[in-house]
Amino acid sequence: MPFSDLPTASRAAPPARERRVRAARPKGQQTKAVIVEAALGLATQLGLEGLSIGALAEVTHMSKSGVFAHFGSREELQISVIGEYFTRFEQEVFESALREPRGLPRLSAMFTNWMRLVAQGSQAGCIFISGAVEFDDRPGPVRDALANSVRTWLSAVYRAVVQAKEAGHLLPDADEQQIAFEIHGLILALHYEARFLNHPGAIARAHTGFANILTRYGSKLPVDPDPPSDFPR
């Protein structure tokens, strides 16, 4: 599952490994990577539909023709941004969770990482969520790329739930699809409460919701004496 020199405080600097890989690319690929980086920063603030060649040219200090030369269309640019966002999402949420043992430890880590990414604001917004609003009723390649990315991630969540059941951490008759659905629902509610309404305590409530899922479906519950408070904004 394959999952920034942008002038905004909401973008974290690329990790050292990413910078080394970028430095090893041919110049044309490096330039394209810089454009995608800037486009990703704009998309997390303005949405995928907010992307424009003119805005990218201004942010990257390039000509419009120079920006456009790296992408055959605005649609191709949007799909590239979705791919880059998916890669970073996978690294931040999924890969670090793989260090945890299979079962509830790994599933809990995935949920905590997901909460942090959605609510903390290391990125200005979640393209998976904002993009669903923009493209829910607009068929085409951009919607397909976005939907496929979300399906891939939700499949990973489902697999983690299945593994938790196989490990004996969930009841034998627990409905894996229902659990994955409820976990996804908590993230969507958290995004709305924490980012749109700015409600205090949203992180703690999401964590409580996750604990309630485990109470209903779990057979061997892990001890969590120190549930996280809201992440700093």
Image: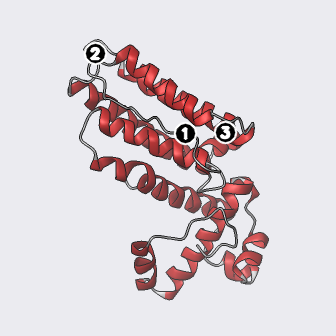
Q: Which mark is residue 194?
A: 3
Q: Residue at x 60, y 44 (%)?
A: 119
Say if residue 148 shows up in the picture: no
Please say if 64 is above or below 143: below
In the rendered image, residue 191, in percent from the top left (x then y), is placed at 63, 38
In the rendered image, residue 156, in percent from the top left (x then y), is placed at 37, 39
- The front one of 16 and 146 is 16
Query: Is 87 left or right of 70, judged from the image as shown?
Result: left
Q: Which residue was labeled with disc 1?
A: 229
Q: How many marks?
A: 3
| Sequence-wise first label, 3 or 2 | 2
In the rendered image, residue 172, in percent from the top left (x then y), is placed at 25, 14
Tell me whether circle 3 and circle 1 mark residues in contact (CB < 8 Å): no
Q: Quadrant of residue 229?
A: top right
- Nearest to viewer (mark 1 / mark 2): 1
Q: Residues within 10 Å of mark 3 (few under 14, many from 20)?
A: many
Q: Residue at x 35, y 47 (%)?
A: 97
Q: Which residue was labeled with disc 2?
A: 171
In the rendered image, residue 47, in percent from the top left (x then y), is placed at 71, 52
Query: Is 100 left or right of 87, judged from the image as shown?
Result: left
Q: Residue at x 73, y 75 (%)?
A: 59
Q: What element does badge 3 sit on?
A: helix
Query: Is 128 left or right of 63, judged from the image as shown?
Result: left
Q: What element does badge 1 sit on?
A: loop
Q: Mark 2: which amino acid? A: Leu
Q: Mark 1: which amino acid? A: Ser
- Nearest to viewer (mark 3 / mark 1): 1
